[in-house]
Structure formats: structure tokens, C-alpha cells
Image (cartoon, rainbow, N blue to C red):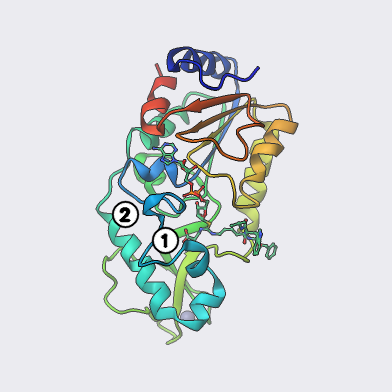
Amino acid sequence: MKATQGAAPDIAANTRDRLAAASAVAVLTGAGISAESGIPTFRGAGGLWKNFRAVDLATPEAFAADPQLVWSWYDWRRGLIASAEPNDGHRALAEMQNRFPRFTLATQNVDGLHSRAGSVDALKLHGDIWTLRCTACGHERQDLRTPLPELPPRCSCGALERPGVVWFGEALPTDVWEQAQQAAREADVFLVIGTSAVVYPAAGLVELAKTSGATVVEINVEATPVSHVVDVSWRAPAAQALPRLLA
Ligand code: BV8
Ligand code: ZN
């Protein structure tokens, strides 16, 4: 059954009923869940930065060609995120983790807002903007300073550091990706929230959950390429919809 444009109350009730019967819940979030915290999404209106697109800058090639430019983009984003707060959508997911025997949150976001909202063990599929990794010795450290004192930052070994994120063309962290796939396979209910579902392999979790027998609910302000796959397509902002699942 696909409820698409039904009035929000019955979609919320419908989704709550499915969750009430679930013992394993898995969630995939994208930039849309941080939109109401004021963080621009990648592909929405605010997704551009000085006329660059994420696919142009979030690549090893762009970093090798111009580490200063790529770091300026990340430093700008870190500044935005530092002044942002988790929203009711992040907080609702943090609350949900205690309500099910098995609950897994996988995020494509690198902003760390799920952790700040209280989500424990969120699977960071695309890494973390607050982590710096040395391009030579691999040493990783957290640096929360905004702006960073020097760009590009350098490791104590002297080499350039890069943002601890997964760029286009790079593999996702193996352990995190394995856990996310397992959670999608085992889920009774799979929530896909605030993602345009165009970036793989993360977006593939939706199909994996669906073919593994989960009830899939999409929460997004617009239709996406997975809207035709999901069981329930809830056209609503995440910070409004998610708290209604806790009622
Ligand atoms: C890999 C981290 C292989 C960094 C990111 C052709 C050439 C090269 C590669 C490819 C290719 N075709 C396919 C690929 C693979 C590529 C890919 O999928 N490309 C896409 C663009 C076609 N994928 C990769 O390269 C991945 N790696 O394949 O490696 C490999 C395998 C083995 C060994 C070696 C190599 C790596 C992908 C990860 C890239 N890193 N980010 C950073 O953040 O700077 S991706 C980037 O896009 C972010 O992580 C972001 O999360 C992600 C997805 O975007 P969304 O989160 O969905 O955000 P978006 O703006 O798109 O959408 C927002 C949504 O929210 C919208 O739907 C909107 O309606 C909604 N919304 C807005 N407001 C709200 C809302 N919803 C609810 N409430 C609201 N209020
Ligand atoms: Zn080093």
C-alpha cells in the first residue's frame, strides 16, 4: 500500500502503527535532516558554494589540485555547522534509539549533529567533518576550531591533513558499511529521511531493506528516485514529522 499525498495525520498514524509492531528499526538520513538547523543541502538552492558544486570539490582530484580551495570550503562549512544546533528531527531520532530492541542510524551527513543530539553509535557512512586525517602517516585527530588556525592544516609529521570524510570515488569505511547493510537487511521498518537518494552505495540501502522485507517509509519535502520503491511517502519536513512518530 502506498500512502503518498494522504493527510499527514493518517500517514503519521500509519507509520506509528508500523513502528509499534517493529523490533528492528533502521534509519538512513541525508542533508535534509540538517536543513532545519540552517545547514544548506547539497542539491537544494543553498547547495552551491561560490558557484562550486559538491561533486566538484568533494573529490581526491580537487584536493590534490587545490588543497587550499577544498579546505576553504570545508572550513566554511565547519563554521556554519559550529553555529548550528540539532533540530527536533535529530532529537526525535536520538529518543527513538531507546524505544526498540534493535535501532540503527546510518547517516550520509558529516556534520555530527546526530551525535550532538544524543544519537549513540550513529554510522557515519561518509565520515566526519570534525576529523582531520594526515595524507602521509594516516594519523587522525579531532579539531573543533572554527576557523582552523592555518589552511591547509598540517600533521605533526609535517604532511598535509585532509578532512576525514569520504569523497566521490572513495570507498566507504568497510566496518561502518557492513553494519549499515546488516541493519537494512534485518529491519522491520526502514526510515529514509532527507536524502535525494542519488549517491551510492548509501542510497542502495533503501532497495536492500525493501527486498529484505522491511516496510520502508520516506520522509522528504519532495519526491526522490526511491519514492516509487517505498511503502509510505510522507511529504513533510523532518523536524515536523519525526516528533510525531514518538507520540
Ligand atoms: C564510491 C561526504 C567506489 C563529503 C559525500 C560517476 C563517476 C564517479 C563516481 C560515480 C559515478 N556514478 C556513480 C558514482 C558513485 C558515486 C555517486 O553515487 N555519485 C552520484 C553523484 C551519482 N559515489 C561515490 O563515489 C561513493 N564511492 O562509489 O566508491 C569505490 C568502491 C570501492 C573501492 C573504491 C571506490 C562515495 C560517495 C560519498 C561522497 N561523499 N559527502 C562531504 O560531505 O563533503 S556525498 C554527499 O552527497 C553528502 O554526503 C550527502 O550526504 C550526499 C547525498 O546527498 P543528500 O544527503 O541526499 O543531500 P541532497 O542535498 O542531495 O538532498 C537533500 C534532500 O533533503 C533532498 O531530497 C531534499 O528534498 C530533502 N530535504 C530538504 N529539506 C528537508 C528535506 N527533507 C526533509 N526535511 C527537510 N526539512
Ligand atoms: Zn602525519
Q: Say which residue label 2 marks.
A: 81
Residue type marked 1: Ile
Report the disc number at residue 129: 1
Question: Disc 1 to disc 2, how far (Cα)?
Answer: 9 Å
The foreground one among 50 and 241 is: 50
User: Against 236, is 169 above or below?
Assistant: below
Q: Position of residue 8 (x, y in %)?
A: 44, 18
Q: Is the residue at mark 1 in contact range of ligand 1, meaning its CB lies under 8 Å from it? A: yes
Q: Position of residue 109 (x, y in %)?
A: 46, 51
Q: Quadrant of the N terminus?
A: top right
User: Against 150, is 221 above or below?
Assistant: above
Outermost right residue: 211
Residue type marked 2: Ile
Q: Position of residue 216 (x, y in %)?
A: 62, 28
Q: Find out whether the residues at labels 1 and 2 contact each other: C-beta distance under 8 Å.
A: yes
Residue shown at the point (62%, 45%) measured from the top left: 203
Residue shown at the point (39%, 51%) measured from the top left: 45
Report the disc number at residue 162: none
